[in-house]
Image (spheres, grey):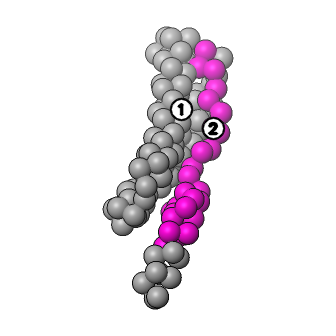
């Protein structure tokens, strides 16, 4: 009976990603404003870049934490839950990637506009 109760409790705990991710916190999904490189000044570009670097560090910490949790939990998840887990983490990474690409484009536009 104790085994069944333990398995039911474990199963209920693994139903939703927010419960699984509780130890790692919420995924960092900051909406950082990237200035228009052609019309921005050096301070705006630098501030945006620093914000993105800090955000990227938080994403790395979150993904690392989730990788550690996955090593313990993935064997107990269904294929659908594993797929959702992977999709959620891929979305966090893709959001960061798109932000970095946008920042790089702004830096290039700033340099072209200022002949650097």
Asked if 77 appears above or below 2 in the picture, the reply is above
CB within 8 Å, label 2 to label 1: yes
Circle 2 Cα neighbour tier, 10 Å, few/some/many (<14 / 14–19 / ≥20): few
Residue 37 in which image quadrant: top right
Q: Nearer the viewer, residue 34 or 76?
A: 76
Q: Is residue 94 visible?
A: yes
The residue under label 2 is 32
Look at the numbered disc 1 and give the secondary structure of its residue.
helix
Q: Nearer the viewer, residue 68 or 72?
A: 72
Q: Residue at x 38, y 59 (%)?
A: 74
Q: x%, y% of residue 104?
A: 48, 25
Q: Is residue 3 magenta?
A: no
Magenta span: predominant SS is: loop
The residue under label 1 is 99
Span colored in magenta: 10-38
Separation (CA) of disc 2 from disc 1: 8 Å
Look at the numbered disc 2 and give the secondary structure of its residue.
loop
Q: Nearer the viewer, residue 5 or 20?
A: 5
């Amino acid at each position: 009976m104790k085994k069944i109760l333990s398995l039911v409790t474990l199963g209920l705990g693994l139903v939703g990603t927010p419960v699984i991710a509780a130890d790692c916190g919420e995924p960092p999904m900051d909406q950082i404003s990237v200035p228009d490189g052609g019309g921005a000044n050096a301070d705006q570009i630098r501030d945006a870049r620093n914000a993105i670097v800090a955000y990227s560090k938080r994403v790395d910490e979150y993904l690392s934490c989730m990788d550690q949790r996955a090593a313990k939990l993935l064997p107990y998840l269904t294929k659908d839950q594993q797929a959702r887990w992977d999709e959620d983490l891929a979305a966090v990474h893709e959001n960061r990637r798109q932000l970095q690409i946008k920042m790089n484009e702004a830096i290039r536009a700033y340099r072209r506009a200022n002949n650097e």
